[in-house]
Amino acid sequence: MNLNSKRGFVPKDEMEFRGDQLEKLKNGAEELFYLLNRDYKIKSASTFIGNHYMFSERQRLALARTISSTKDIQLRKRKQVMEAKKSKEVYIDGFNTIITLETALSGSLLLECMDETIRDMAGLRGTYRLIDKTVLAVELILKYLDKNMIQRAIIYLDAPVSNSGRLKQLIIKQSEEYKVDITVEVINEVDRILEKLPFVITSDAIILNRCTSWINMNRDIIKNEIEGHWKIKLYDFHE
C-alpha cells in the first residue's frame, strides 16, 4: 500500500482550473451545452471547443465529464432514487466509486456535474494501486450502507485492472465489522452487468443512461463526510 499518495493529483491543476482558466472553462462549458442540445457528439463538440480555447487534454476531459445534454440530465434524474433506504439491495461500480472517494480524501480535483454526480479526474487505464486513503474510502461506503439500512450490496470490480484481487480482500475484511452483507465480484465487463440493474451506485454516464435506477451515494458521502475536498463547478447557466 502506498502511503501519503494523492489519488488524482496533477500539479498543473492549480493553474488550469483556477482564475482566468476557470472562467474560460465556464465559457467553454456553456458552448458545449449548447452543442450537445443540438445533437452534436460529445467527442467532436469538446474537441471543437477545446481547439477554439486552446484547452489542454485534461481541461477538455473536465468539460466532457461535467456537461450533459438536457435530455440526458432529465433521463438520469427520472431514474435517481432519492432515498437510499428504499433499496434493500444495491449494486456498486467498485473502482468508479472508490477512486472518486480516494480523490476527495486526497484533496485532488473533483467535478460537480450537471447530472448532480461528482466525478473525478483520476483515470484508471488498467492500473490501480491501493493507497493510504483506500481503507477510509471503503469504510465510508460501508458506513453509508449501514446508515441507510441496506441489507445487501454487491460490489463489482473489473478483473483486468491490476490489484482488483487485493482490493476485494480489503473490502471483505473491512465489511466484517458492519451489518450489511457484502459480496465482491471480480469480473470482466462490469459496465454490461450494471447497465441492466436497478439501484446502481456509479457516476458512469453510460451506465446511468441505461440502468433501471441509481443512487447518488458519492455526492452524499463527499458532502457530509469529507471536509476540505476541492470541487469545481463549470456551469451556472442551468440551475
Image: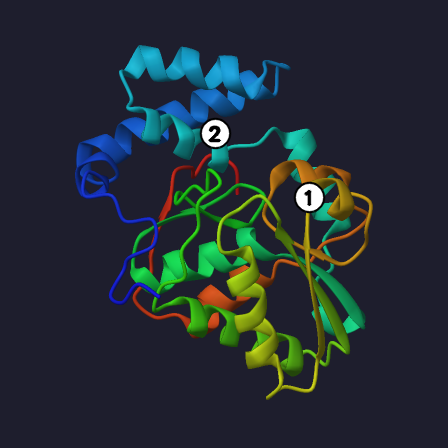
Q: Is 76 situated left or right of 19 in this image?
A: right
Instruction: Identify the image quadrant of the N terminus.
Output: bottom left
Q: Are marks 2 and 1 in contact (CB under 8 Å)?
A: no
State the SS at label 1. loop
**Quadrant in which residue 131 is drawn:** bottom left
**Label of residue 188 in the image:** 1
Name the residue type under label 2. Ala
Q: Position of residue 32 (x, y in %)?
A: 47, 22
Choose the circle earlier in sequence order: 2 or 1: 2
Name the residue type under label 1. Asn
* Residue 71, placed above or below residue 80: above
State the SS at label 2. helix
Return the residue nearer the eye: 225 or 167.
167
Q: Position of residue 24 (x, y in %)?
A: 28, 27
Q: Position of residue 88 (x, y in %)?
A: 81, 73
Which residue is located at x 73 percent, y 39 percent?
Answer: 75
Q: Which residue is mark 2?
A: 64
Q: Badge 2: how crowded within 10 Å, few (<14), some, or many (20+)?
A: some
Give the spatial CA distance, label 2 vs label 1: 25 Å
Q: Position of residue 4 (x, y in %)?
A: 24, 65
Which residue is located at x 57 percent, y 20 percent?
Answer: 36
Return the residue nearer the eye: 37 or 2.
2
Q: Is 23 situated left or right of 87 in this image?
A: left
Which residue is located at x 34 percent, y 70 percent?
Answer: 227
